Amino acid sequence: MSSRRKYHSVREYLADVPPAPRRRLNDIRRLVKKHVPRATETISYNIPAFRLGKTFMYCAAFRDHISIFPPVRADAALSRALGPYRNARGNLLFDLSEPLPLTLVARVAKALAREHVPSGRRGP
Protein backbone atom coordinates (compact mmCIF):
# COMPACT_ATOMS: atom_id res chain seq x y z
CA MET A 1 0.00 0.00 0.00
CA SER A 2 1.40 3.37 -0.96
CA SER A 3 1.28 5.86 1.89
CA ARG A 4 2.07 8.80 -0.43
CA ARG A 5 -0.62 8.19 -3.03
CA LYS A 6 -3.74 10.33 -2.87
CA TYR A 7 -6.82 8.10 -3.18
CA HIS A 8 -9.95 9.34 -4.92
CA SER A 9 -12.08 6.23 -4.45
CA VAL A 10 -12.36 3.18 -2.24
CA ARG A 11 -11.61 1.08 -5.32
CA GLU A 12 -8.25 2.85 -5.75
CA TYR A 13 -7.44 2.36 -2.07
CA LEU A 14 -8.28 -1.35 -2.19
CA ALA A 15 -6.16 -1.84 -5.31
CA ASP A 16 -3.09 -0.98 -3.20
CA VAL A 17 -4.02 -3.25 -0.28
CA PRO A 18 -2.56 -6.78 -0.12
CA PRO A 19 -5.09 -9.66 -0.42
CA ALA A 20 -5.48 -10.61 3.28
CA PRO A 21 -6.28 -7.13 4.60
CA ARG A 22 -8.34 -6.39 1.45
CA ARG A 23 -10.60 -9.35 2.27
CA ARG A 24 -11.07 -7.96 5.79
CA LEU A 25 -11.90 -4.49 4.50
CA ASN A 26 -14.40 -5.98 2.07
CA ASP A 27 -15.99 -7.94 4.93
CA ILE A 28 -16.34 -4.67 6.87
CA ARG A 29 -17.77 -2.91 3.82
CA ARG A 30 -20.39 -5.66 3.38
CA LEU A 31 -21.34 -5.46 7.06
CA VAL A 32 -21.79 -1.71 6.93
CA LYS A 33 -23.88 -1.95 3.75
CA LYS A 34 -26.06 -4.61 5.38
CA HIS A 35 -26.52 -2.99 8.79
CA VAL A 36 -26.44 0.69 7.79
CA PRO A 37 -27.93 0.45 4.29
CA ARG A 38 -28.26 4.20 3.72
CA ALA A 39 -24.55 4.74 4.33
CA THR A 40 -22.41 5.78 1.38
CA GLU A 41 -18.73 5.02 0.90
CA THR A 42 -16.14 7.69 0.41
CA ILE A 43 -12.48 8.44 0.97
CA SER A 44 -11.75 10.72 3.91
CA TYR A 45 -8.30 11.34 5.39
CA ASN A 46 -7.12 9.16 2.48
CA ILE A 47 -8.80 6.01 3.86
CA PRO A 48 -12.20 4.35 3.29
CA ALA A 49 -15.04 5.94 5.22
CA PHE A 50 -18.82 5.74 5.51
CA ARG A 51 -21.25 8.65 5.57
CA LEU A 52 -24.82 9.34 6.63
CA GLY A 53 -24.94 13.05 5.96
CA LYS A 54 -21.50 13.22 7.58
CA THR A 55 -18.75 10.69 8.08
CA PHE A 56 -19.42 8.30 10.95
CA MET A 57 -16.84 5.51 10.47
CA TYR A 58 -13.40 5.02 8.95
CA CYS A 59 -11.46 1.81 8.30
CA ALA A 60 -7.90 1.28 7.16
CA ALA A 61 -5.49 -1.52 6.33
CA PHE A 62 -2.07 -1.86 7.92
CA ARG A 63 0.59 -4.53 7.56
CA ASP A 64 -0.63 -6.67 10.48
CA HIS A 65 -4.10 -5.38 11.26
CA ILE A 66 -7.25 -3.55 10.19
CA SER A 67 -8.37 -0.51 12.17
CA ILE A 68 -11.78 1.09 12.66
CA PHE A 69 -12.14 4.69 13.84
CA PRO A 70 -13.44 6.59 15.82
CA PRO A 71 -14.02 4.89 19.17
CA VAL A 72 -17.54 3.87 20.18
CA ARG A 73 -18.50 6.13 23.08
CA ALA A 74 -22.27 5.99 23.60
CA ASP A 75 -22.73 2.23 24.12
CA ALA A 76 -21.07 1.13 27.36
CA ALA A 77 -21.82 -2.58 26.88
CA LEU A 78 -20.37 -2.56 23.38
CA SER A 79 -17.34 -0.58 24.57
CA ARG A 80 -16.65 -3.26 27.18
CA ALA A 81 -17.02 -6.03 24.59
CA LEU A 82 -14.51 -4.22 22.37
CA GLY A 83 -11.88 -4.03 25.13
CA PRO A 84 -9.51 -6.64 23.64
CA TYR A 85 -9.44 -4.75 20.33
CA ARG A 86 -8.96 -1.17 21.60
CA ASN A 87 -5.71 0.72 21.40
CA ALA A 88 -4.72 3.48 23.87
CA ARG A 89 -6.89 6.02 22.02
CA GLY A 90 -9.89 3.70 21.88
CA ASN A 91 -9.67 2.97 18.16
CA LEU A 92 -10.11 -0.66 17.15
CA LEU A 93 -7.34 -2.91 15.85
CA PHE A 94 -8.19 -6.32 14.43
CA ASP A 95 -5.09 -8.47 13.99
CA LEU A 96 -4.92 -10.25 10.63
CA SER A 97 -3.82 -13.47 12.35
CA GLU A 98 -7.14 -13.73 14.26
CA PRO A 99 -10.70 -14.16 12.98
CA LEU A 100 -12.55 -10.89 12.39
CA PRO A 101 -15.37 -10.64 14.99
CA LEU A 102 -18.10 -9.96 12.44
CA THR A 103 -20.92 -9.60 14.96
CA LEU A 104 -18.96 -6.99 16.92
CA VAL A 105 -18.01 -5.11 13.75
CA ALA A 106 -21.68 -4.96 12.73
CA ARG A 107 -22.57 -3.61 16.19
CA VAL A 108 -19.78 -1.02 15.88
CA ALA A 109 -21.10 0.19 12.51
CA LYS A 110 -24.61 0.60 13.86
CA ALA A 111 -23.42 2.28 17.06
CA LEU A 112 -21.16 4.74 15.24
CA ALA A 113 -23.95 5.59 12.79
CA ARG A 114 -26.28 6.33 15.72
CA GLU A 115 -23.61 8.40 17.52
CA HIS A 116 -22.58 10.50 14.54
CA VAL A 117 -25.74 10.90 12.46
CA PRO A 118 -26.72 14.60 12.25
CA SER A 119 -29.78 15.72 14.18
CA GLY A 120 -32.99 15.39 12.26
CA ARG A 121 -31.78 12.45 10.17
CA ARG A 122 -32.92 8.95 10.84
CA GLY A 123 -30.27 6.54 12.10
CA PRO A 124 -29.20 3.24 10.56
Image (cartoon, rainbow, N blue to C red):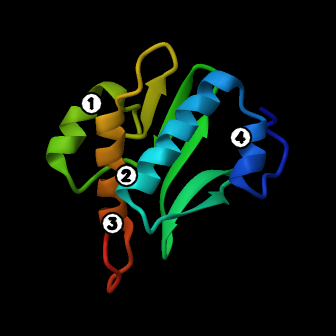
Which amino acid type corresponds to the residue marked 4 in the rendered image?
A: Leu
Instruction: Kindly identify the residue that appears in the image at 31 percent across and 78 percent down.
Output: 122
* Mark 1 or 3, nearer chain start: 1
Is 5 positioned to the left or the right of 36 in the image? right
Callouts 2 and 1 close, C-beta under 8 Å: no
**Figure check: 36 above or below 6:** below
**Figure check: 3 above or below 120:** above
* Mark 2 or 4, nearer chain start: 4
State the separation of the CA atoms marked 2 and 4.
20 Å
Where does residue 120 sit, x and y in percent of width and height? 32, 86
Mark 2 sits on what residue? 109
What is the crowding at mark 1: few (fewer than 14 residues within 10 Å), some, or many (at least 20)?
A: few
Look at the image and tell me whether residue 42 can be seen.
yes
Mark 3 sits on what residue? 124
State the separation of the CA atoms marked 3 and 2.
9 Å
* Mark 2 or 1, nearer chain start: 1
Instruction: Kindly identify the residue that appears in the image at 39 percent across and 33 percent down.
Output: 88
Residue occupying the far right of the picture? 5
State the separation of the CA atoms marked 2 and 1.
16 Å
Which amino acid type corresponds to the residue marked 3 in the rendered image?
A: Pro
State the separation of the CA atoms marked 3 and 4.
25 Å
Closer to the observer: label 1 or label 3?
3
Which amino acid type corresponds to the residue marked 1 in the rendered image?
A: Gly
Where does residue 10 sit, x and y in percent of width and height? 69, 51
Callouts 2 and 4 close, C-beta under 8 Å: no
Instruction: Kindly identify the residue that appears in the image at 41 percent across and 31 percent down.
Output: 87
State the separation of the CA atoms marked 4 and 1.
28 Å
What is the crowding at mark 4: few (fewer than 14 residues within 10 Å), some, or many (at least 20)?
A: many
Mark 1 sits on what residue? 83
Residue 14: which disc?
4
Tag 1's secondary structure?
A: helix
